[in-house]
Image (cartoon, rainbow, N blue to C red):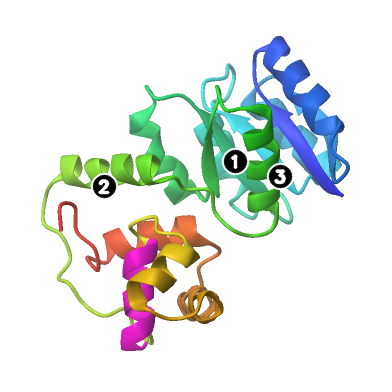
Amino acid sequence: MIRVLIADDQGMVRTGFTVFLSSQPDIEVAGEAADGREALLRAAELRPDVVLMDIRMPVMNGLEATRELLSGRHGPAPRVLILTTFDLDDYVYEALRAGASGFLLKDASAAQLAEAVRVVAAGDALISPGVTRRLIDEFARMGGPRPPVRRAEGLTERETEVLTLMAQALSNQEIAARLVVAEQTVKTHVGRVLSKLGLRDRAQAIVYAYETGLVRPGG
């Protein structure tokens, strides 16, 4: 069972998510929280696998709660799936840097919600091309000198290629088609990239690729 904690300041949202997720055979709603501070307390108590974290909450917002939750100071960290809306572009970059495993629009369908929980719980990242586009725009907006383009330390040429395509939010299937290799081969390369760089998932890989200059906004 995938244990989920729902953190949102709107009671109706929490109730709706709880009712649907509880109906799934492989998902259990372990608890709810109405603000970021409560989310930290409940996560420490309940040890969920995944936290659905709203950004805009009182007392402590979702971004601050995510950063604190994934700091390692509160025991084993769960996966965090950020609940967002289209007008929260400014949070995308910081949420990824804080360690969030992905983003889900609050108007997503019930089926998309359940699938997002499963994807994140399985250790993958839920980063849509649209969100990646906003991340790229954020890097471009930040401006300033960027690091020189270089191959990521310890990666082979093919692994560097795979990392570059991951940073463009391509799926394993899309990367396989681009490189004309089997999808299982791509999965192996992805696993090696994450392992060699000490990254947890694709979300962190995207941030790494842009911060090291491997991939540049508009290039």
**For mark 2, what is the residue?**
136
Of pointers 1 and 3, the one earlier in the residue sequence: 3
Which mark identifies residue 81?
1
**Is 146 placed left or right of 60 in the picture?**
left
Q: Amino acid at mark 1?
A: Leu
| Marks 2/1: CA–CA distance | 20 Å
Magenta residues span 156-166
- The residue at 71%/45% (across/down) is 50
Does the magenta portion include 112?
Answer: no
Please tell me whether the stretch drawn in magenta is mainly helix, strand or loop. Answer: helix
Report if residue 73 is visible in the image. Answer: no
The quarter of the picture where residue 72 lies is bottom right
Find numbered disc 2 in the image and state the secondary structure of the residue it sits on. Answer: helix
Q: Position of residue 34 (x, y in %)?
A: 70, 19
Find numbered disc 3 in the image and state the secondary structure of the residue it sits on. Answer: strand
Which mark identifies residue 50?
3
| Marks 3/2: CA–CA distance | 26 Å
Tell me whether circle 1 and circle 3 mark residues in contact (CB < 8 Å): yes
Of pointers 3 and 2, the one earlier in the residue sequence: 3
Find numbered disc 1 in the image and state the secondary structure of the residue it sits on. Answer: strand
